[in-house]
Image: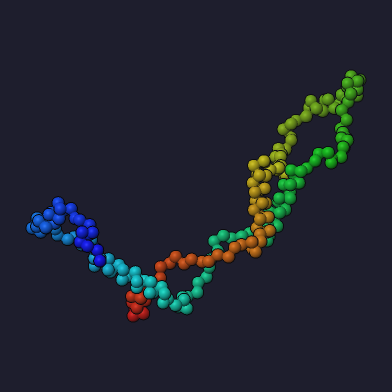
Amino acid sequence: MCDVKDLPKQDEKLQSEVTAFSAQKLKHVEPVEKVVLPSKEDVKQERDHLNLLHGVEGFEASKLKPTDTKEKTILPSPEDVKQEKQHVNLLHGVEGFQHTNLKPTETQEKHVLPSPEEIKIGKHADVAQDIAKFDSGKLSRTETKEKIVLPSKEEIEQEKGQVKLLSGIENFDAKALKQTDTQVKNTLPTKETLEQEKNA
């Protein structure tokens, strides 16, 4: 065993302060509870939340009624697509028309006008008299109707956009769609609501 001499010595000043310490010098302190208990409203909200979770877990999907899905987007019918194709083909024919494919034609004049020499000779003096005596009031008024109206550049661009849309609809591959999970956003009723409906 080691001797008392070998033990470490304490500081005499520190030892005197410890022996002379008085507990009456300590200040009185009131403890503060940091843990706050929930209020009645918090407890009620927690119970409602738990009831809702229990209602969702115990909900039976067999009680749901079947509903009919209504499609708001109406796709064009085959007849509409066919008409659009014909119209588009007509526009492409107008755009891609080549004047070089036209055959030259000769204009035949049915009414040959007299030459200056013949007019001088006077062979057509009767014609000149008839022209002078002609009454334009006997002519009937006519209106010119254009049967073929070519589309403008803006209309052709619009038709191109419709053609791309129609071709996308016709060539649409349903296999390219990805499978998605439907998320129900409607809040399910609680047990209290279900009981009230049963009692009603």
Q: Quadrant of residue 20?
A: bottom left
Q: Looking at this view, is 27 or 166 the one in front? A: 27
Q: Looking at this view, is 88 or 111 the one in front? A: 88
Q: Quadrant of residue 156?
A: top right
| Quadrant of the rendering where the N terminus is positioned | bottom left
Asked if one can make out residue 46 in the rendered structure from this viewpoint, the answer is yes
Q: Position of residue 18 (x, y in %)?
A: 13, 56
| Quadrant of the rendering where the C terminus is positioned | bottom left
Asked if one can make out residue 77 in the rendered structure from this viewpoint, the answer is no
Side of 3 where 56 appears, left or right:
right
Q: Position of residue 16 (x, y in %)?
A: 12, 54
Side of 37 where 145 appears, left or right:
right
Residue 102 position (above or below residue 53): above
Residue 68 position (above or below residue 97): below
**At 64% from the left edge and 61% from the top edge, which residue is drawn?**
176
**At 44% from the left edge and 65% from the top edge, which residue is drawn?**
185
**At 64% from the left edge and 42% from the top edge, which residue is drawn?**
154
Q: Looking at this view, is 58 or 84 the one in front? A: 58
Q: Residue furthest bottom?
A: 199
**At 28% from the left edge and 69% from the top edge, which residue is drawn?**
44
Side of 156 where 51 appears, left or right:
left
Instruction: Specify how the rendered protein is coloured.
Output: rainbow
Number of numbered discs visible in the structure rendering: 0
Residue 115 position (above or below residue 187): above
Q: Residue furthest top?
A: 120
Q: Looking at this view, is 154 or 23 the one in front? A: 23
Q: Position of residue 195 (x, y in %)?
A: 34, 78
